Amino acid sequence: MSYRGRIAPTPSGYLHAGHIATFGIAHRRARERGGQVVLRIEDLDPQRCRAEFVEAALVDFRYFGFDWDEGPDVGGPHAPYFQSQRTEWYREVFERLQAGGHLFPCVCTRRDLRMLANAPHAGEEEPVYPGTCRARKISGAADEVAWRFRVPDGREVSFVDRALGECRFVAGRDFGDFPVWRRDGVPAYQLAVVADDHAMGITEVVRGEDLLLSTARQILLYEALGWEPPEFYHCPLLCDESGARLSKRDGAARASKQQGLRSVASS
């Protein structure tokens, strides 16, 4: 299969230099290999994602010289490229996982998880889920509870990252049962990304090092669905002067063009 990469911003804020650096690497790796670039807007969260951030991201991409072969303003065989418009596809994937016995309903809240003794360190997504609802009898429709993927405890998940080399994680120790469908009816990040990268034929995923654990989780989803996972390339994160990694509230790339971000995108 020819190379197919993707740029997948989440429009919950303006882009910062770290985003531009990562998207620049993704764009360059695709073009150097004579491959295609897919632009996908990951706008699943209705509370945080806004149209103005989508428009701003498109302006930034064009400013920094990023073009794409499929996605907004281009079209293509897999349109639409807004995740908010692809719920029917995610539901199909969810039902396939459910039929395979890989999921269980969960009524635990974020507050419940934060109160656990093994609460996460700063920057981590959540504590390792302790399996509270694995054996519970919970009734209700799919959209009335959250649904988690049942990880095989003790299973080592390994992959060779094209930037970092061999990476190994242990299910149940490094990460626990993870959400694939939220109680508000919105598919979770892990399910949506795997479903779309498969459907769009992505051959290499380029993203930040902060998503290494997500890669381990997603490999388990690929296996459960009987799909071949793509290759992965995890980029180092950009940090501020204090050593903290940049976040969207640190300012937009579009507001910092005079600070030399063109060199960041091409470095």
Image (tube, helix red, strand yellow):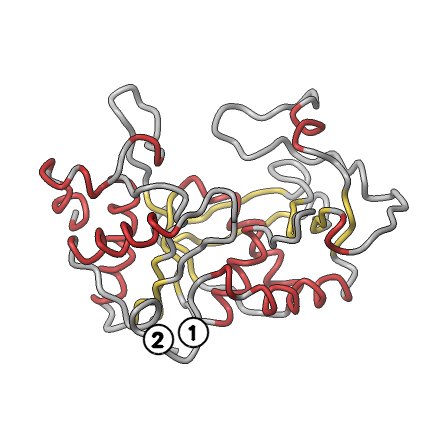
Which amino acid type is marked by label 2?
Gly
Which amino acid type is marked by label 1?
Ala
Q: Secondary structure at mark 2?
A: loop
Find residue 202 and report its image quarter: bottom left
Classify residue 167 as left or right of residue 93: left
Q: Nearer the viewer, residue 26 or 247?
A: 247
Query: Do callouts 1 and 2 mark residues in contact (Cβ within 8 Å)?
Result: yes
Q: Nearer the viewer, residue 233 or 119?
A: 119
Q: Which residue is mark 1?
A: 79
Classify residue 234 as left or right of residue 213: left
Label annotation for residue 75: 2
The quadrant the N terminus occupies is: bottom left
How far from the left and from the top, in percent, is residue 212? 47, 44
How far from the left and from the top, in percent, is residue 111? 67, 27
Q: Nearer the viewer, residue 52 or 218?
A: 52
Find residue 142 and report its image quarter: bottom right
